[in-house]
Image (tube, coloured by chain):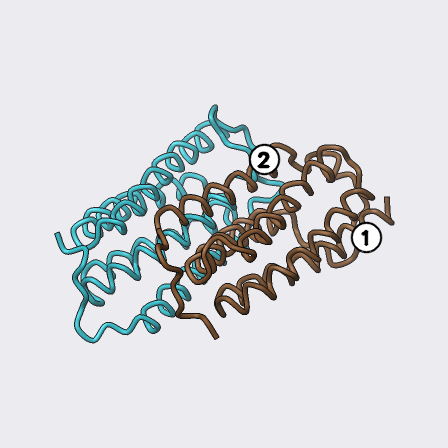
Chain colours: A cyan, B brown
Amino acid sequence: MAADDTYPNFNPALAAAACGILVALTSLTGALAPPGDWYAALNRPPGTPPDVAFPIAWTLLYIAMAVAAWRVWRARGPGREVALFVLQLALNALWMPVAFGAHALGWALLVIVVLWLAVAATTAAFWRADRLAGLLFAIYLAWVSYAVYLNAGLFWLN
Amino acid sequence: MAADDTYPNFNPALAAAACGILVALTSLTGALAPPGDWYAALNRPPGTPPDVAFPIAWTLLYIAMAVAAWRVWRARGPGREVALFVLQLALNALWMPVAFGAHALGWALLVIVVLWLAVAATTAAFWRADRLAGLLFAIYLAWVSYAVYLNAGLFWLN
């Protein structure tokens, strides 16, 4: 239980800038490859939420991710946990261009399953470093689980 | 300059729950009265952003509002500033049902102009109580200014 640890020489502003900028850049991949008319014309699996749910959920999740990474950085410094975070963020950034840019739902399914594994590993590492960060990542993991289902449904129905 | 003041007997969890729940309830008015097909068929003024910008902007703004109100509550207690905040939040909650529920763009314009005045007054009060809260509300005020223009454009073009 290390929730109140602080890494020596922790720089709050530097960590906030790094986490904020990395997450903001990742969120831009959604703007570069929007779902558009192609997505609107797909057959969707049961349980697909209304379109407006995605930007709201992702805005909240990106903020939760940045806060979680900042807290883990504070607790443990820029070590293994933050490296896992950057890895899952890179996979996250890849999904929208593959799914909505390239219209490659099979490759997108592969990306999101690997993303799920990376988020699960990050959640476990974050939980050990900081309880709140672990909880925030558990919510993100739940959402990605749902997104795996939606991606699989889109792949098989279209 | 009172940014580091803390109100005596400030209860961080109570203030967070109150600010969070009030703002979350307000955000639900958007879900109850979505723009829908009616909005999609309107003539839009130049400079209207893509639809996806609204849920992203409002998710960020509602979080900013809740953080700002929490900080001002911490600095000044539940006084005049928090009362102004609740007033602007009530006007904010009114806009979506009037515009997209009742399809009354003229009345919605009246609501949003009064909202602008309430947000401006809250921004001034928040700035004096807590600098970060004032900055967060200044961003919100800028967005509401843009929304006044969009509402006016929709009213005159339709």
Q: Residues within 10 Å of mark 2 (few under 14, many from 20)?
A: few
Q: Secondary structure at mark 2?
A: helix
Q: Give me the residue at 51% from left, 29% from top.
A: A44
- In depth, the one of B113 and B38 nearer the eye is B113
- In depth, the one of B49 and A40 nearer the eye is B49
Residue A33: % across, % down = 53, 52
Q: Give me the residue at 38% from left, 39% from top.
A: A143
Q: Residues within 10 Å of mark 1 (few under 14, many from 20)?
A: some
Q: Give me the residue at 47% from left, 47% from top.
A: B19
Marks 1 and 2, how far apart at CA: 23 Å
Residue A34: % across, % down = 56, 49
Say above or below: B74 vs B88.
Answer: below
- The residue to which callout 2 is attached is B31
The disc at residue B140 is none
Q: Secondary structure at mark 1?
A: helix
Residue B87 seen in the figure: yes
State left or right for residue B152 relative to residue A60: right
Furthest residue to the front? Answer: B8
Residue B77: % across, % down = 45, 56
Check disc 1 and give the amino acid type. Gly
**Of pointers 1 and 2, the one earlier in the residue sequence:** 2
Residue A81: % across, % down = 21, 58
- In depth, the one of A45 and B116 nearer the eye is B116
Q: Chain of mark 2?
A: B
- The residue to which callout 1 is attached is B153
Q: Chain of mark 1?
A: B
